[in-house]
Image (tube, rainbow, N blue to C red):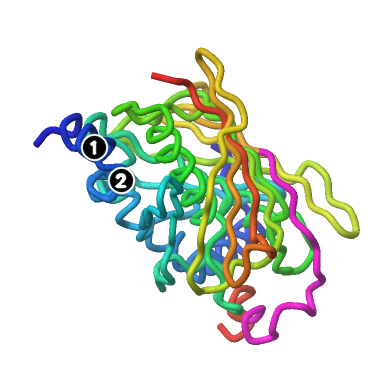
Amino acid sequence: MSRRDTMHKALEQGDLSALVERIPYAKMIGLVCERFGDDLIFRLPPQESNVGNPILPAIHGGVIGGFMELSAALYLMRSQDTPKLPRIVDFSIDYLRAGLLRETYAECRLTRQGNRVANVMVTAWQKSRLEPIATARAHFLMA
Amino acid sequence: MKKQSAQDDVLFGQVSRFIRSLRQSHLLGIEPVKAAENELILRLPYSESIVGDPETRIIHGGAITTLMDTASGSVIICALPEFELCPTLDLRVDYMRPAEPDKPVFARARAYRVTRNIVFTRCEAYQDDCETTVAHCVATFMRIGADASPKAYRELITGVNE
């Protein structure tokens, strides 16, 4: 099945895991996409290879960034119902707490959808949703 | 490229050990190419495992973010008098163009302002030559002091036991 077919099927069923399977970077960091009704929650299970700071140990800031960036792109594909990965323009992340080596979650919100550019907000948390470890926003060019 | 001085070799060694201690950076094969006073160039080799789109084989932005976060965080070693582990406060990446497949990506970083509490960094990611910029990044790091990182870890990086 081509990616386009996989994507169409994934979009129809509202299940992005088949698509995530085909993205090598997603597999490397271990991103999982979960669906709760209409909502999507992205999950990053603890994985030794994702560690940056070895003392805490904490997840590498770059991995947290990559996880949130990829979550935003997948979320946008679902909300736009498009089989093409949107192209990222810029990405800005605030690290609020150390991301310890434990289950990490992310949820996204479409802040603004223009004709050509979309703005997506992402929040990531671990133990409690009320204590985010990072917030980020990204601009994407629509395909 | 100017030849590295003895002091640069010390910095190069410290940066190499620091990056090796960051499992994800090490896993991606990120390595220093050049270290000098307040200047650092790192290299990220191309690999299929960091591809974001299997059709175009273009590296995912996340791997570029990890490269730039590593470069910006490590240049602090080249900018401060002694090793301090500085957590990232924030980071912004502008993606100029996709990185071409099968080629390494380089990141050059410098700390453009160091205060008692904060280090401000800039970093460019490029391929082939410095003209083809792939991404640009600004970041801020918090100084928590040299004493905040365990002595054994500091010695591992500075290599006092060697």
Q: Position of residue A94 (x, y in %)?
A: 69, 50
Marks 1, 2: nearer the viewer: 2
Q: Position of residue A131 (x, y in %)?
A: 69, 65
Q: Residue at x 36, y 57 (%)?
A: A32
Query: Which amino acid type is shown beneath numbered disc 1?
Result: Pro
Q: How many neighbours does mark 1 have within 10 angstroms: few (below 14), some (14-19), or many (20 or more)? A: some
Reply above or below: B157 against B6. Answer: below
Which disc number belongs to residue A2?
A: none
Q: Quadrant of the N terminus of chain B?
A: top right
Q: Residue at x 78, y 41 (%)?
A: B112
What span is colored magenta in the figure? B138-155
Distance (Cα) linking label 1 and label 2:
16 Å
The reply to whether the C-beta atoms of the residues labelled 1 and 2 are less than 8 Å apart is no
Which disc number belongs to residue A16?
A: 2
Q: In the rendered view, does A44 fall on the left or right side of A91?
A: left
Q: Residue at x 74, y 55 (%)?
A: B141
Dividing the picture into quadrants, the one containing residue A8 is top left
Residue B123 visible in the picture = no
Reply above or below: B132 against A1. Answer: above
Q: Secondary structure at mark 2?
A: loop
Reply above or below: B110 against B158. Answer: above
In the image, B58 versus A139, the foreground residue is A139
In the image, A23 versus B29, the foreground residue is A23
Q: Position of residue B64 (x, y in %)?
A: 47, 43
Which disc number belongs to residue B54?
A: 1
